[in-house]
Image (tube, rainbow, N blue to C red):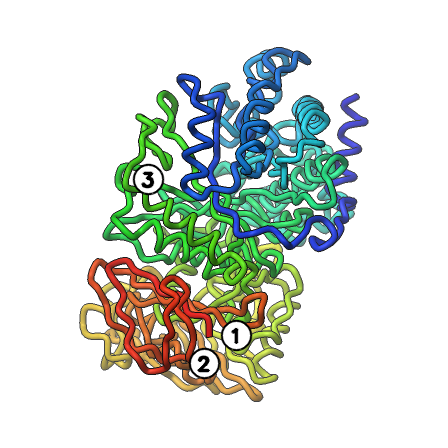
Amino acid sequence: MKKHFLFILLLSLFNHVFAQKPVETRYALSLPLLFGVAYYDEYMPYERLEKDVAMMKDAGINVVRIAESTWSTVEPQDNVWDFSHIDRVLNAMHKGGISVIIGTPTYAFPTWLAKKYPDILATTSKGKNLYGARQNMDISNEHFRFHAERVIRKIMEHVKDHPAIIGYQVDNETKHYGTASENVQKAFVTYMKDKFKTVEAVNKAFGLDYWSNRINNWDDFPVVNGTFNASINASLNSEFAKFQRQIVTDYLAWQTKIVKEYAKPNQFVTQNFDLEWRGYSFGIQPDVDHFAAAKALDVAGIDIYHPTQDALTGIEISLGGDITRSMKNKNYFVIETEAQGFPQWVPYPNQLRLQAFSHLASGANMLEYWHWHSIHNSAETYWKGLLSHDFEPNPTYNEAKTIGKDFARLSDKLINLKKKNEVAILFSNEAQTAFNAFSFGWGARENYNDILRPYYDALYKMNVGMDFIDATKNPELSNYKLIIVPALYAASDDILKKLNQFVKDGGHVVYTFKSGFSDENVKVRSTVQPAIINEACGISYSQFTIPQNVSLKNDPFGVGKDNNKINTWMELITPTTAKVLAYYEHSSWGNYAAVTQNQFGKGLATYVGCMTTSALTEKIMKDALEKANLWKTEQSLTFPIITKSGVNQQGKTIRYIFNYSAVPQQVKYVFGNGIELLSNQSVSKDTNLNLEAWGVKIVEE
């Protein structure tokens, strides 16, 4: 059985057999804007289902997600089934006219399964997992896969004909969870054989002669699990991380394939991806190849959590939305976001509305809160839902009622918003893994997302719409005028040459330090840095250091003394054909360039060789936008006034204007004449709009 299962697992990993039909053939695009919550009848301390449905309807909620946490409830013992909670909720929601999304309950498995098959608990770099936490399993384990498939099929067989169901969610915030169990190690060796053919090719690509790490026989292949010892060779460690991400892609495609055997043509399949976590959603998720994993799905979904109160900026809402929309170049679902959330996240008045419409402005077709009711005992007791522990109406719930009414009234105008952006951020999971692997080597506190976020944040605050493009997927660059390339530390020759050609053909690129430094196998290029992109950038460097009391000479961007400093990293750049925008201010490093710009062909390449302050980053990006002829009407507004736009399904421009501050704002409306949809009042160009604290206006032009 083990050999047979391993063969099937490897076949699915290497051959990607789960080709899916396009989304248009899987579900009708006639769904309204979806406004909902996660609902857990099995957690309730007393019977109140009928009352909950009534309160949901009063709030305009038209969809709930259920069942993704119910494995131990639906299968209390091996092959013993109880679907009563699912049935109760399905029937009650259908009676109340509320649609349902069913989740497969595989992200947390029951106690009896852990006892029967202890090997399901993953071995990671920290050792063997213990039972209790969620997402503690090896998702490629044969016993886990057998029982996961069985519970999925049992639920699907039971619910597939229920008229309340509009779609399905596979698993929950899926990642590889650091799994490095014995079967994963064996599968990795097979993967390496398939990719590299010979051990000599591996030794050469990864430089394994170092410290006698050379592999002379496939049978001697070492355990790789992300520990410090494995990180001695970042090439091997990064390849293993890539393989772990492929396990996730395979796992979600496997689940999706099972679900689609039962799903109706008008039902979708989605997944709630999440981002790197910093106490809130922060950046590119390192443990999932989102763009690959999303291919099997009909709709990409995302969980977005963010600070509120005085710290609410909308950046995380926008970032998560832009990433998810870019996964499939389609509208997406926000499957989880906070209503009240942590105590520090309880929203000020108007903030829940502001957040809701901010999701729509990035292209979301669904907004669901996690969750409906606050839980009375668990790890998430103080992660509060739309209702508090007393289940009574509260200010957040009452504000949600206004959102539900506006979503229902304006659904036809706001759903399926199409966005076309001329700016993109080029990212790479492979570069992320490689860059992060070397943080111990130079004592850096920043990781990959710390480099990416300041550029995204600066553009967001200047009201620049963005897409994300994956450097490893042979992306089409010609759709854009300006591409930001943060810390592309590991990259193939092909993508770097493609970027050079993009500039030569008239595009503009902004690179940060450490871009192009190593190849896709994390082997540092032996040519003058920044290697292949030298051609477009017109610079060279061979040394770099960590700055000590270094600023930019003569404050070239006019940001003032406190903001003119650089930190963390500096490359000692010599221009060849590039124009120097900034030199270092330092007694020893003053002859070296910090920021350069080079005309190459019809385009322009900007290179930022150091870690800049947010003020410097904004100035650099403003310069890049102006030179790319992208400084437009939207840029006359700036944070805390945020504007986003798109074209609705009637072909009209929808323009959102947000006030991300506690101070009322008067904004000159510099766009075309239209109707403000929330108030149903006409708006003329160059008139003033009054936005209350944390307010929003939506104009259909």
Q: Is residue 87 above or below residue 229?
A: above
Q: Quadrant of residue 119?
A: top right
Taking the spot 38% from the left edge, 42% from the top edge, the residue there is: 338
The amino acid on which the numbered mark 3 sits, given as a three-letter code, is Gln
Residue 4 % position (x, y): 81, 27
Query: Mark 1 = which residue?
Result: 422
The quarter in which the N terminus is drawn is top right
Q: Is residue 422 left or right of residue 441?
A: right
Secondary structure at badge 3 equals loop
Contact check, label 2 and label 1, Cβ < 8 Å = yes
Taking the spot 51% from the left edge, 42% from the top edge, the residue there is: 62
Query: Mark 2 = which residue?
Result: 630
Q: Residues within 10 Å of mark 3 (few under 14, many from 20)?
A: many
| Mark before the other along the chain sequence, 1 or 3 | 3
* CA–CA distance in space, label 2 to label 1: 8 Å
Contact check, label 3 and label 2, Cβ < 8 Å = no
* Whether residue 288 can be seen here: yes
Q: Residues within 10 Å of mark 2 (few under 14, many from 20)?
A: some
Contact check, label 1 and label 3, Cβ < 8 Å = no
Q: Nearer the viewer, residue 356 or 224?
A: 356
Q: Is residue 540 above or below residue 266?
A: below
Query: Mark 3 = which residue?
Result: 340
Q: Quadrant of residue 149?
A: top right
| Mark before the other along the chain sequence, 2 or 1 | 1
Q: Is residue 367 above or below residue 606?
A: above
Q: Nearer the viewer, mark 3 or mark 2?
A: 3
The amino acid on which the numbered mark 2 sits, given as a three-letter code, is Leu
Residue 45 % position (x, y): 40, 18
